[in-house]
Image (cartoon, grey):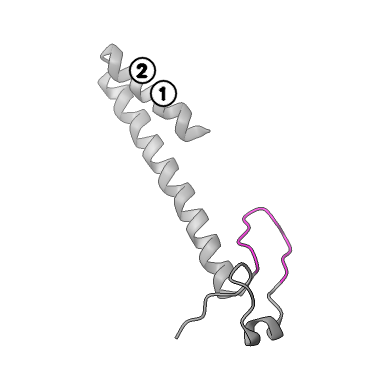
Amino acid sequence: MVAFATLAMALTAAGTGHTEWAMLAGIICAATILFGITVMTTTVHRDHVDHHNVPSLLNDTWETTPAFARRRGAPRAIEPHRMR
């Protein structure tokens, strides 16, 4: 929500000729988007490394894929990514 709000502020400021405010709001918008992408990608990466079924940012608990399912070739939806 912060990114969308600051994007609107940046566009409004740029349209009315307030370049300093437009730059400030644009930088805040870009930083917010980069931070959000970083948090999501690191969560997905950690969940794949730990063999979690579904990457989840908001859950405190998760279920790991059972060892027998990893060995026999479970359906693609729950099979973890393996490093070779």
Residue at position x 62%, y 55% in the image = 57
For mark 2, give the secondary structure: helix
Query: For mark 2, what is the residue?
Result: 12
Residue at position x 63%, y 73% in the image = 75
Is 73 left, or right, of 62 in this rendering? Answer: left
Mark number displayed over residue 24: none
- The relative height of residue 35 versus residue 48 in the rendered view (above or below) is above
Q: Give coordinates of residue 43: x percent, y percent.
A: 55, 61
Quadrant occupied by the C terminus: bottom left
Number of marks: 2
Front-most of residues 84 and 4:
84
Tags 2 and 1 in contact by the CB under 8 Å rule? Answer: yes
Q: Is residue 49 magenta?
A: no
Front-most of residues 27 and 84:
84
Q: Give coordinates of residue 1: x percent, y percent.
A: 53, 33
| Mark 1 closeness class: few <14, some 14–19, many ≥20 residues within 10 Å | some
Residue at position x 48%, y 47% in the image = 36
Looking at the image, the residue that sits furthest to the top is: 16
Looking at the magenta stretch, what is its main secondary structure?
loop
Amino acid at the residue labelled 1: Ala
Q: Give coordinates of residue 52: x percent, y percent.
A: 64, 70
Mark number displayed over residue 8: 1
Amino acid at the residue labelled 2: Thr
Q: Which residues are magenta?
A: 53-63
Q: CA distance from mark 2 to mark 1?
A: 6 Å
Q: Give coordinates of residue 78: x percent, y percent.
A: 63, 70
Front-most of residues 54 and 8:
54
For mark 1, give the secondary structure: helix
